[in-house]
Amino acid sequence: MAGGEPDVGSAEFYSPSSGLWEPLPDLPVSLKYASGAGDGADLWVAGGQDDDGGFSGVIYSLRTSSDGNWEEEGALQGEAGEEGGVVWAAAALTDAC
């Protein structure tokens, strides 16, 4: 899960077999309204807003084959903004992932 308020920098993994949430390393920054994805082994978090309300275009990954820390993978391509209280983004993942 990703997104929403307040800003969140923590990450957890849910194990359906045990029914428990397990902690993962914290993200490098706290974000709100970010998007997340996973493929069963690796996780990605992209976009969102930082504590100051600025828009983040960074793609972070947590790869099970790495040292276990979040890494910057690249940047979203496109524009982001806020209009009428609604946060919107037009972006695509780069080939860095």
Image (cartoon, rainbow, N blue to C red):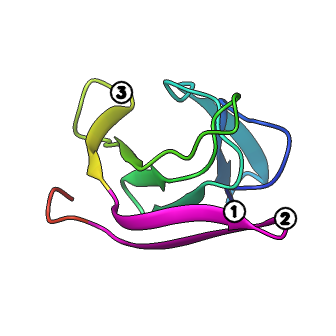
Q: Residues within 10 Å of mark 3 (few under 14, many from 20)?
A: few
**Residue 33 appears left or right of 62:** right
Say which label, 1 or 3, has the lower sequence index: 3
Q: Is residue 77 magenta?
A: yes
In the image, which residues are magenta? Answer: 76-93
The residue carrying mark 1 is 82
Q: Amino acid at mark 1?
A: Glu
Residue 81 vs 92, above or below: the answer is above
The x and y percentages for residue 51 are 70, 29
**Residue 5 appears left or right of 49:** right
Q: Is residue 49 magenta?
A: no
Residue 93 vs 6, above or below: the answer is below
Q: Which quadrant is the N terminus positioned in?
A: bottom right
Q: Amino acid at mark 3?
A: Gly
The residue carrying mark 3 is 68
Q: Can residue 36 be seen at all in this image of the molecule?
A: yes
Specify the label residue 19 is tagged with: none
Q: Residue at x 31, y 43 (%)?
A: 63
Q: In front: mark 1 or mark 3?
A: 1
Q: Residues within 10 Å of mark 1 (few under 14, many from 20)?
A: few
The x and y percentages for residue 45 are 48, 51
Q: Amino acid at mark 2?
A: Gly
The residue carrying mark 2 is 85
Q: Which quadrant is the C terminus positioned in?
A: bottom left
